[in-house]
Amino acid sequence: MFDASNLKVDLSADTLVEYATTILTFVRTNLQEYIDTRSIRDEIEDLICLIIAYRFLLNLLVLIYGYGPIRVLYDFYKTVTSQITHRLLSLPVLREKVQKQVADTRAIIENEFIKNPRGATYRSIPEHGLTDNQVKRKLDTLAKEKAANWQGGQVSGAVYFGDDKVAKLQADTYYKFCFANQLHPDAFPGVRQMEAEVVSMVLKLFNAPATGCGTTTSGGTESLLLACLAAREKAFSERGITEPEIIAPVSIHAAVFKASKYFKMKLRLVDLNDDFTVNVAQVKRLINRNTCFIMGSAPNFPYGTIDNIEALSDLAVRYDIPLHVDCCLGSFIVAYYSRAFGEELPSFDFSLPGVTSISCDTHKYGFTPKGSSVILYRHPNYRRYQYFVSTEWTGGLYGSPTLAGSRPGALTAGTWATMIAIGNDGYINSCREIVLAARRLKQAIHDEIPALEVIGDPLVSVVAFKSDKLNVHTLSDNMTKRGWHLSALQRPSAVHLCVTRLSVPVIEDLINDLKVEVDELLEKHEEVESTTAQLYGVANSLTVNSVADDIISAFLDVLYQDEKST
Ligand SMILES: *Cc1c(COP(=O)(O)O)cnc(C)c1O
Ligand SMILES: CC(=O)N[C@H]1CO[C@H](CO)[C@@H](O)[C@@H]1O
């Protein structure tokens, strides 16, 4: 009979030494034999294979642990399928077809974007300079060219304030500082002062500790790029991490995908919970020794939902990993929310100990001129890793705090001037108006348009909705015919409105137009997909999604075209 007591292992010192010697001898003899029979070259090859296999396995384990085996298999299947179709589509027979399709789409894009107003186009510098009045007339012509009614508040996001008084102030400020360059603080001490004060004002809004610091940047994208770069450099310098990884929800802004590509950081995307905020348990599972940054949004761009930053902060503290909160969109809305409504949002700022950096776009709800954002850090120890310094350059000792070299001082002055002109009372008021309008939209969709479903529970200025009764992208295109420019989202197919000061007075009009268009679409039973709906269909199809890349690139090409190609 089987006797478990026989399995007892003798752990006395002598036997342990005996075991160890046996194992060592085994390894030694085999290794010796291996060394004797293989050439140095073979051995090096084997070693490299071993390292590659080890790293592949490690990566696979992280993936399986983080996402589960089924999801990993599915992603693998997706990658393989799209690789194969990509290859297939580049076969001569098919390539022609694809190129034709892309060219057709490109022609549509050209028609929409290239306007060439008569008498106001230059393909090269005119031989003789024009008078100011001539230039102004041409500028007037170009300013009249517009496809979207942003002044009427019909565009999602884009222009957040549009107040004429503020525009005047910004233009005057630009004139005063139009030659200023922050690269030369000695020549423009006033601009240096203003930049420092802009950073300091925004730090206060996000409850930074006394050690808080930051820099201004050219926009949310640059703020996020710098935050990722700093995290990468810090991880390399302090922990020797050479394969840095970012963990962020799928709802994180595209600028983080850009950072991942530019700076060669692996982006581990995290799924969302049913409420469309980050799945914190999955974040935890994805943390490994290469993790150098955790990111969350307050709120995110697609749905306007706020991630559970408190839980992310706990993880960040526990594993000692820097945590970034993207408040690019939240901007001054989340910062002023408690003062506007007398109640708190779920915590998202430096009051949580794990939060090490925050990006805030002043050019969104700070209403400052476009090209202005701020990146904030808990401590200078984080900020110094975004700096570029060179003592080698023949051009002299060089140091630059952000991505750009020369920077427009006029923008910093415009930012500073706008912020002190609007003041706390102005920002509190606009926060209240905007959030109330967004709440009204949310309520109306929920109560009065049963065919649409609000996504998650957006607390601030963005409201996204989807539908299982109609194609929302077609709905959105039909709304465009009424002047509305909503933003298309995917996975799931949805549409959002980012409420600005300009959309506040027209929110009821939007609701009414939505009702009418929804009814019309529901009445028409035949499924006609609009251009946007088709494009997203292509982008999400497993077999032809590489065509979508070509179409987006064609779109970018068209932006730099001075005339139509046909
Ligand atoms: C707008 C936005 C950004 C940055 O965008 P920019 O266009 O570069 O200013 C980043 N994150 C979120 C959530 C945003 O909405
Ligand atoms: C009411 C309306 O304009 N409906 C249109 C929505 O878009 C589809 C596809 O372009 C058209 O077929 C509908 O007529």
Image (cartoon, rainbow, N blue to C red):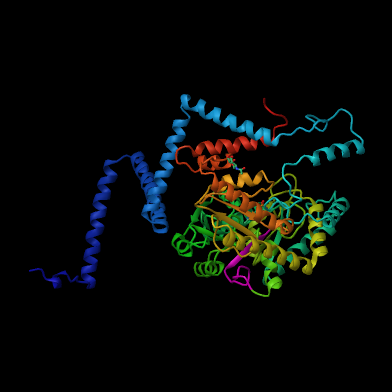
Q: Is residue 498 left or right of residue 42?
A: right
Q: Is residue 492 left or right of residue 416?
A: left
Q: Residue furthest bottom?
A: 342
Residue sitting nearer the eye, 252 or 377: 252
- Whether residue 258 is visible to the viewer of this picture, yes or no, is no
Residue shown at the point (85%, 36%) measured from the top left? 138
Assign the magenta stretch its main secondary structure. Answer: loop
Residue sitting nearer the eye, 393 or 210: 210
Residue shown at the point (80%, 38%) measured from the top left? 142
Residue sitting nearer the eye, 487 or 450: 450
- Whether residue 180 is visible to the viewer of this picture, yes or no, is yes
Q: Is residue 250 left or right of residue 56?
A: right
Q: Residue furthest front?
A: 523
Residue sitting nearer the eye, 337 or 494: 494
Q: Quadrant of residue 2?
A: bottom left
Q: Quadrant of residue 557?
A: top right
Q: List x then y, in percent, for residue 307.
A: 55, 64
Is 426 contained in the magenta span?
no
Q: Which residues are magenta?
A: 344-360
